[in-house]
Image (tube, grey):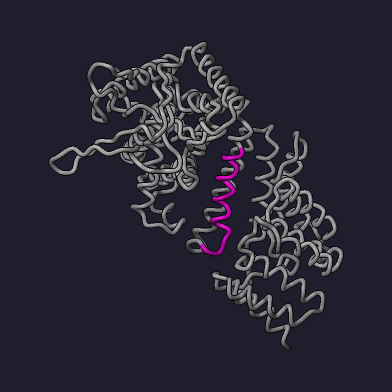
Amino acid sequence: MTTDSGRAALEQTVREEAGLVLAALVASCGDFDLAEEVFQEATLIALERWPREGVPDRPAAWLITAARRRAIDRLRHGSMRAGKSAALRESELAQRAARGEQDADLEEAPVPDERLRLIFTCCHPALAPEARVALTLRTLGGLSTAAVARAFLVPEPTMAKRLERAKHKIRDAQIPYRVPPPEEWEVRLASVLAVIYLIFNEGYSATGASAQERAALCAEAIRLARIVAALAPGAGEAHALCALVLLHHARREARTGADGVPVPLDEQERARWRHGEIRDGIASLERAARCAGRGPYQVQAAIAAAHATAPTGSATPWRLIAALYAELEALLPSPVVRVNRAVAEGRASGALAGLALLAPLESDPRAPQLASYQPYHAARADLLVRAGRSSEAREAYVRAIALTRDEAERRFLEQRCAELSS
Amino acid sequence: MQYALLFYTTETFDLLAPDVRADWLAQMAEFRQSLVDAGVLRGALRLAPGATATSLRSNGDELLITDGPFAETKEILAGFMLLDCADLDAALAWARRCPIARIGTVEVRPEHPEGPARGPGDVSSRA
């Protein structure tokens, strides 16, 4: 055993199993801070011992055991916090450890997967939405606070404070660490899935950090979606979310041209799509369809699948997609969905049909700032071009361009507008 | 652990029709009874309107007495209950059943993690 291989094994364990280890530690410590600190200490012990003594057969279990011993020591010495709650936690932890030791050491028993409990705690509705996202990435994704801060374009101290507040609220308000009971299950699962989708969108949108970091966020969201789907196999929406993010991510290399300008779905180069990932996404969608109920993620995944399985851009099944958007709008009424539906309907039944669907938005109370709603003007411009109404289209492009903050997106619209003039 | 349910409402209750008020008070009584039956209620108080409030605050050396509540806001503290619950989810489940949640805001606050401000009268579970 060389020093390098011990270190490499540790790095790999931390990279791949940090969420699993941390979840087990939060479960036994009942305290995020303590769990993180002893996890850190356990990796330092491993860094010293693995190169010398060899990598244990079950590295994650080894780390959990070492960290738990550290936690008991620290609580015994009262080095964490004075007061009764620390003493209470110590006795609970000691009891758990004693039980664990009786059942033979953890290093032989299977590691209990506590990640589902952890993710339900991290996504508890009593925490602020941005804190849920950050805490999930930090604890289940094992991302450093600095990396989470970069992903959300906030200074590291701000993110550290946000995480700290969330962890203290969990501890002080006693947010339970458990999978919610059946009567709360649906609402709570929706919160978990929303957090994962937010993480994905942060990576998917062009506004985040570097391309590499954004891809890492997408990959992390996919990993989390897979974990939740595997741990809650009866939840159709969990499989559907998994399908949705896989299908979107499979197109990552074709989404933008060499100049960074976005390429519309039906004009993308299909050879650059990851067809293996598309197959995985379709398989997840099929699993979702076998579960009871059909929610918004399943409909969105079905739309993504319709695009992904069309053999060519011109063979895109727009009629099916328009019908799916109509179904989505019934489930999740919003101006965003209406705009997308209008685009699809415009391709299925002609630009006038699309424009007719956009028209009611102008009197929709949910879109009070329609004048400044970029997607509306961009979609309208496209439909007007297809309807042959060039001068109105140009006006719509000008409004859309003025409202576009993303540089690449603006160039895309400018190109379209210029084609109109020529 | 102790949780306070703090009830914030606009002060329009007295303007309601008598039968609506009676029905609403009956719902509150029913809610309190279910808390008693479950053995979680440690105390409850319905407060008189904000117009009856008197506030004291220090202005450097002297204590000033002013008419009115702590802050003049549209929603005012209208009452509170103290519940003994296992965790936040249990407290939130009760808060959800509280009739006030449908007309105002129910704030759920845990007791301080350091335990009681030592002395008589404290109802902390960490005493």
**Which quadrant of the figure has residue A224?**
top right
Name the spot of residue B93 as percent of width and height, x first.
53, 25
Residue pictured at 52% horizontal, 64% vertical: A207
**Which quadrant of the figure has residue A1?**
top left
Residue pictured at 44% horizontal, 27% vertical: B5
The one of B107 and A230 positioned closer to us in this rendering? B107
Residue B9 appears in the picture as rendered? yes
Q: Furthest residue to the left?
A: B61
- Identify the magenta region: A190-207
User: Is A252 on the left or on the right of B29, as rendered?
Assistant: right
Name the spot of residue A139 as percent of width and height, x first.
45, 41
Q: Is A344 located above or below residue A181 in the figure?
A: below
The one of A6 and A276 positioned closer to us in this rendering? A276
Tell me, yes or no, whether the highlighted magenta stretch contains residue A70.
no
Name the spot of residue A174 as percent of width and height, x first.
42, 28
Q: Is A200 located above or below residue A24 in the figure?
A: below
The one of B18 and B25 positioned closer to us in this rendering? B18
Majority SS type along the magenta span:
helix
Name the spot of residue A255 as percent of width and height, x first.
65, 65
Residue A124 appears in the picture as rendered? no
